[in-house]
Amino acid sequence: MYIERAAVNATYIDFVMNFVHFWSIVPFLIVNAVLIYFIIRYRRRSAEDRTSKIAHNTRIEILWSVIPSIVFIVMFALGAHSFYSMRAAPADAVEIHVTASKWRWEFAYPARATGLAKSVQNDKVLLLPDKKPIKLILKSKDVIHSFFVPAFRVKEDVVPNMFTYVYFTPDTSMADTNEFDIFCTEFCGLDHSYMVARVRVLPENEWKAELQKLEAAAGEVSVAAGKAIFDSNCVACHSLDGSRKVGPTFKGLFNAERKFMDGSTAVADENYIIESMKEPNKKVVEGFPPAMPAQTYSDAQLRSVLEYIKEIK
Ligand SMILES: [Cu+2]
């Protein structure tokens, strides 16, 4: 019946949820059962049937005021306490940046959090150390998205021009696996339902080793690395076969003449393609909306994509 739990707080959150559900559903059923019974038992049977004169009943009135009040106060206390337990991230929490854009999640691991020489980034799989307090700092490049990891029981809006965050401590000893789903739960356009990623929780030393691999790979320029980036991030909006998607096709793009919305033109050389990725709204291709999110890749990654685009004839 339960979605997998994989964070220290998850059991508590589920308990609060069940408490509220129990005290909503059970009294609802009792009140309605009594209501139906009374409707039948005390229905008007003849024209002479008169309602007896009952003003009030102090004992019952005290009971139905005091019992719900106690339940509501406990509900409030549990709600407030569980809310603060999810918001008060400790100062030594591992801080990782999560960036949403149409329609993907990107993750950046600052050097301060990882102990590496430089910050590293990836997408598709958020890598986290097990049993460490984590603070994910969320931001959107375009519209409002929402970051949801059911297994950690955290969900938060991801908003442009503003940081939001979620805080939790993953604990894979509670679950059968160390990989969990990330969803976008705010309708954000065409491919909203595909805006998914995974989170992989690893023992701290393995987590560091994975990040070191990312650090090494970020410096490599290759068509294969470019293709990998295309397959995960560009394919939603760009085709390779000449067909039109949200954006123009990459078929025959390199060195082709481009026309822009403002009437100017340019040749799609190296400079143009790199600029199109870093500052997509500087030159907007005629007939297309300015709907491309700015890409935040390392120089080597941008060059890899460039080399890949050159191959698509
Ligand atoms: Cu979204």
Image: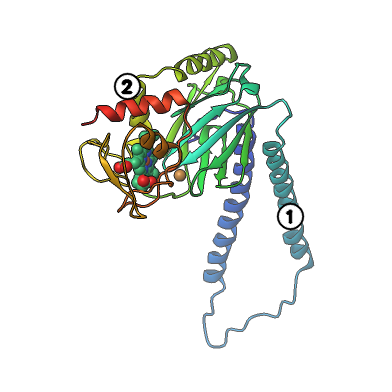
Residue 62 relative to residue 9: left or right? right
Residue in the image at 33% along x and 40% along y: 236
Residue in the image at 59% along x and 60% along y: 31
Residue kind at label 1, given as amino acid type: Ile
Residue kind at label 2, given as amino acid type: Val
Residue 78: x %, y % from top left = 71, 43
Q: Secondary structure at mark 2?
A: helix
Report which quarter residue 44 is drawn in: bottom right
Given residues 161 and 44, the one toward you in this image is 161
Q: CA distance from mark 2 to mark 1?
A: 69 Å
**Label 2 environment density (alpha carbons within 10 Å; few <14, some 14–19, many ≥20):** some
Residue 266: x %, y % from top left = 32, 43
- Give the number of marks: 2
In which quadrant of the rendered image does the C terminus lie?
top left
Can residue 191 be seen in this snapshot?
A: no
Report which quarter residue 221 is drawn in: top left
Q: Looking at the image, tell me whether mark 2 or mark 1 is earlier in sequence order.
A: 1
Residue occupied by mark 1: 67
Question: Contact, CB < 8 Å: mark 2 with mark 1?
Answer: no
Residue 145 relative to residue 271: left or right? right
Residue 144: x %, y % from top left = 51, 49
Q: Which mark is residue 223?
A: 2
State which image quarter holds ligand 1: top left
Can residue 241 be seen in this snapshot?
A: yes
Residue 295 relative to residue 156: left or right? left
Rendered view: 43 above or below 204: below
Q: Secondary structure at mark 1?
A: helix
